[in-house]
Image (cartoon, rainbow, N blue to C red):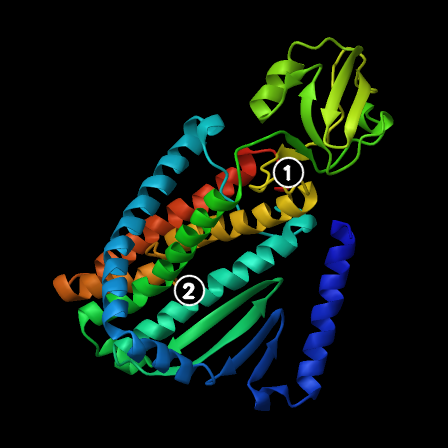
Amino acid sequence: MNTEGFLIFFGVFWLALYVYGRVSLMKNKGVEVQPFLLLYRTKRFNQLFDRLAYRYQRGWRIFFDAGVALALGEIAYGAYFFMTNFLALLSRPETAGRVILLIPGVTVGLQTLPFILIALAIVLVAHEGSHGISSRLEQIPVKSSGVFFFLFLPGAFVEPDDEAFKSSRLTSKLRVMAAGSLGNLAVAFVVSILILMLFTGPSGILILRLRQGGPAQIAGMHEWDVIQSIDGTPIRTWEDLQSYMNSVRAGSVLTITTQRGIFQIVARDPQNASRAIIGLESYGSVEYYPVRGGVQKPQYEYNLLATLSWIQNLSIWVAVVNMLPIYPMDGEKFTTAILSRFLPRRANLFRALITGLFLFIFTSNILLSFFRFEFLPLP
């Protein structure tokens, strides 16, 4: 499905869902439908939070105390990264990182959507589950919890009792607010270990998309082929491929070895005869990391690694961004609780200044990334 088809389907889906929500009794079952928002609220998970919190109280307290310390580090790292990246985007954009919102079909390819949805589901369960457990551990009632879809992305929430939260001790507030990001970092740590255990180092270039009418396609190469060597020279990384192709003249005959066999191509761009190419699409290939044990199923290995990598990266960045002191992030309540305790008379002033500064820097990173970089979706 192309981007236009996706957007048409997206609009029709939300229109039909909204109309159905207006004429049905879904709200009586905890389901609420608003324009581009589908929300389900329940109390079914409250008992689960209680059981988990009370069964391992000592371990949870150590875990969530560590989360408070890590939260301070996340705030410091977030401030450092987004400030230095903001300055780099202004002065040396080639050294800056690209900060984008994940919009399927716009900033990320639609083929990436399944990986994102799986990763988001795990990120949300870890994040909100940690909030629920920490709330009950601190004797703060949970009014409800649930899931929602806003536009095209899923979300989840745990709703602690506001009055009980406001009247709780500072340490309780900090533990609850830091818990979500801590859950995400724990997931990222576990997934990082899994990646190290399951996969070896790069062992070739995996083809995801071929250029139509390009040399590789004409020679019979396919998607999911792995380039292992060219003219007998091992190709394991992108640097290996780029280094070799820089020495190739247009029109040269290259012998490419893949896991399916050997192919000979004429390295010439059909649209520019003076340029030597293999014929891979932009963002159409990645380094191939095989599973340990020689499974040699490139498509499955790529899908597994892509899923784990999205879980790892989203977990880390959700943890960091969530602790920025910007409303409605957890970091805003975290810093407000500290300011209210130690600077009660000037808490609102400092809160406004800090929130305004971080909001400016964060949004500037997104806007400058849009204008400074070529607008190509991530693969």
Cα–Cα gap, marks 2 and 1: 30 Å
Q: Position of residue 132 (x, y in %)?
A: 37, 74
Which quadrant is home to the C terminus? top right
Residue 271: give x, y in percent of width and height: 82, 20
- Residue at 54 percent across and 63 percent down: it is 121
User: Which type of secondary structure does the marked residue at label 2 adopt?
Assistant: helix
Image position, residue 95 (x, y; %): 45, 28
Q: Foreground: 54 or 258?
A: 258
- Evaluate if marks 2 and 1 touch, with contact meaning CB atoms under 8 Å apart: no
Position above or below: 346 against 217: below
Q: Would you call the spot at circle 1 few (<14 residues within 10 Å), some (14-19), or many (20 or more)?
A: few
Q: Would you say residue 349 is visible in this rendering?
A: yes
Q: Which of the 4 image quarters holds residue 16?
A: bottom right
Q: Relative to residue 127, is residue 311 drawn left or right?
A: right
Q: Can residue 283 be seen in this view?
A: no
Front residue of this view, candidates 213 and 229: 229
Would you call the spot at circle 2 few (<14 residues within 10 Å), some (14-19), or many (20 or more)? many
Instruction: Answer left or right for 346 relative to 59.
Output: left
226 shown above or below 323: above
- The amino acid at mark 2 is His
Residue carrying label 1: 376
Could you tell me which residue is drawn at 70 percent across and 18 percent down?
A: 230
Residue at the location (83% across, 29% down)? 217
Of the two numbered discs 2 and 1 on the same chain, state the one appearing first in sequence: 2
Residue ID for mark 2: 127
Position of residue 150 measured from the top left corner of the image (x, y, whole percent): 58, 66
Residue positioned 56% across, 32% down in the render: 202
Q: Which mark identifies residue 25?
A: none
Instruction: Name the one closer to the observer, 297 or 84.
Output: 297
| Residue type at the position of mark 1 | Leu
Which quarter of the picture shows residue 239?
Answer: top right
Q: Quadrant of residue 235?
A: top right
